[in-house]
Image (cartoon, rainbow, N blue to C red):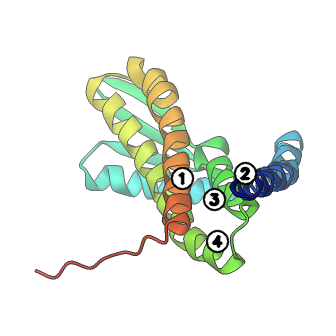
Amino acid sequence: MVEEVQRKKRIENLKKVGWFIIKSNLLAIPLYALIFLDFSWPPLQEFIAYASFIILKGLHYQVALEGITILTASAGELNKVDISWDSTGWKSLYTLAALTLAVSYPLRKKLKFLVFALPAVFLINIIRIVSTIAYSMTFGFKYFDSIHTLLWREGLIFVILAFWIGWLLKVKYNIRQTHIHI
């Protein structure tokens, strides 16, 4: 009897995994279509470039802004950092939304999570851009590609997975936020 219950539970879990794989792959189709069509939305690039510029100026870095290009002056060097379409973090935001929507949880729980998580990842992406530029201005632009590629590209993947797995565990184990009053 116990073995039969365990077998049914395994089959149910395999069905959930199968549906997740199917849904996540279907949700990946628009992502690949946008990549194939070389889609971009310049107003988002301009907004992120402007926000990054304002933060860097607030941190007293010598920067200027020309469209989507942040011009930096440090150690007698003039460098240009373009906020490309990929720098907007759109793939990260889309991936987090797709992973969330593919899970077999009620839509209300998914939307509640995305309302928090998407703006948080968006802000983390701006921090990624600002910190990469600030570090490069401080220690030299010879480190720009290494920081951008190794630390932050993979770092953003880690952030997405951490948010998503944390949310999955919270929903699965019904973890509630506790408020500590001091």
Q: Tag on residue 3? A: 2
Q: Is residue 29 above or below residue 44?
A: above
Q: In this view, does 110 lie above or below 18?
A: below
Residues tagged 1 and 4 counted as in contact (Cβ below 8 A):
no
Q: Alpha carbon of mark 1 to alpha carbon of mark 2: how far?
A: 30 Å
Q: What element does badge 1 sit on?
A: helix
Residue placed furthest toward the front: 1
Badge 3, how many Cα within 10 Å: few under 14, some, many 20+? some
Between 33 and 82, which is closer to the camera in this rendering?
A: 33
Q: Alpha carbon of mark 1 to alpha carbon of mark 4: how far?
A: 13 Å
* N-terminal-most mark, 4 or 2: 2
Q: Alpha carbon of mark 4 to alpha carbon of mark 3: how far?
A: 25 Å
Badge 1, how many Cα within 10 Å: few under 14, some, many 20+? some
Q: What element does badge 3 sit on?
A: helix
Q: Residue at x 36, y 23 (%)?
A: 77
Q: Name the residue under label 3.
A: 44
Badge 2, how many Cα within 10 Å: few under 14, some, many 20+? few
Residue 1: % across, % down? 74, 58
Q: What element does badge 2 sit on?
A: helix
Q: Mark 1 points at which residue?
A: 165
Amino acid at pointer 1: Ile
* N-terminal-most mark, 1 or 4: 4
Q: Alpha carbon of mark 3 to alpha carbon of mark 2: how far?
A: 55 Å
Q: Mark 4 points at which residue?
A: 110
Residue 84: % across, % down? 63, 41
Can residue 122 be seen here? Answer: no
* N-terminal-most mark, 3 or 2: 2
Amino acid at pointer 2: Glu
Residues tagged 4 and 2 counted as in contact (Cβ below 8 A):
no
Q: Is residue 171 above or below residue 154?
A: below
Task: Locate residue 78 relative to residue 173 in the image: left or right.
Answer: left
